[in-house]
């Protein structure tokens, strides 16, 4: 476990060993979320790697759910 410091601008530095392990480079984006009192930073999934993984997926329902989530984030 490592400790990081939050700067005056709210910035944090991800330790080099973690960046290397996760192949994170300058300009990469992370998804950040709070869950049960914890902060999670997660590299976004490469959705192309999931193509065909769920053959009976109802994409209409999934698209509707995504649209609903996006609408909620705007408010």
Image: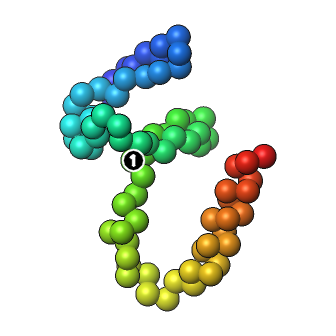
Closest to the observer, 29 or 55: 29
- Which of the 4 image quadrants contains residue 62? bottom right
Position in image of residue 16 (x %, y %): 24, 28
At label 1, counting other C-alpha atoms closer than 10 Å, the crowd grade (few under 14, some 14-19, many 20 or more) is: some
Q: What element does badge 1 sit on?
A: loop
42 displayed left or right of 67: left
63 displayed left or right of 25: right
Position in image of residue 43 (x %, y %): 39, 47
Vertically, is 62 above or below 36?
below
Closest to the observer, 67 or 43: 67
Quickly name the residue at label 1: 43
Residue located 43% across and 81% down the image: 54
Vertically, is 31 above or below 13?
below
Q: Which residue lies furthest to the right in this view?
A: 75
- Which of the 4 image quadrants contains residue 29? top left
Q: Which residue lies furthest to the top in this view?
A: 8
Closest to the observer, 25 or 2: 25
Vertically, is 26 above or below 8?
below
Position in image of residue 44 (x %, y %): 42, 52
Q: Which residue lies furthest to the front in this view?
A: 27
Vertically, is 48 above or below 19?
below
Residue located 43% across and 22% down the image: 12
What sort of colour scheme is used for the picture? rainbow
Position in image of residue 4 (x %, y %): 39, 19
Q: How many labels does the image show?
A: 1
**Placement of the N terminus among the 4 image quadrants:** top left
53 displayed left or right of 39: left
Residue located 62% across and 81% down the image: 60
Residue located 56% across and 80% down the image: 59
Closest to the observer, 28 or 5: 28
């Amino acid at each position: 476990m490592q400790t990081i410091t939050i700067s005056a601008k709210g910035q944090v530095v991800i330790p080099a060993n973690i960046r290397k392990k996760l192949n994170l480079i300058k300009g990469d984006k992370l998804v950040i979320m709070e869950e049960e009192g914890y902060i999670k930073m997660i590299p976004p999934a490469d959705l192309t790697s999931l193509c065909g993984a769920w053959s009976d997926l109802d994409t209409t329902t999934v698209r509707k759910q995504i649209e609903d989530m996006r609408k909620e984030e705007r408010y």
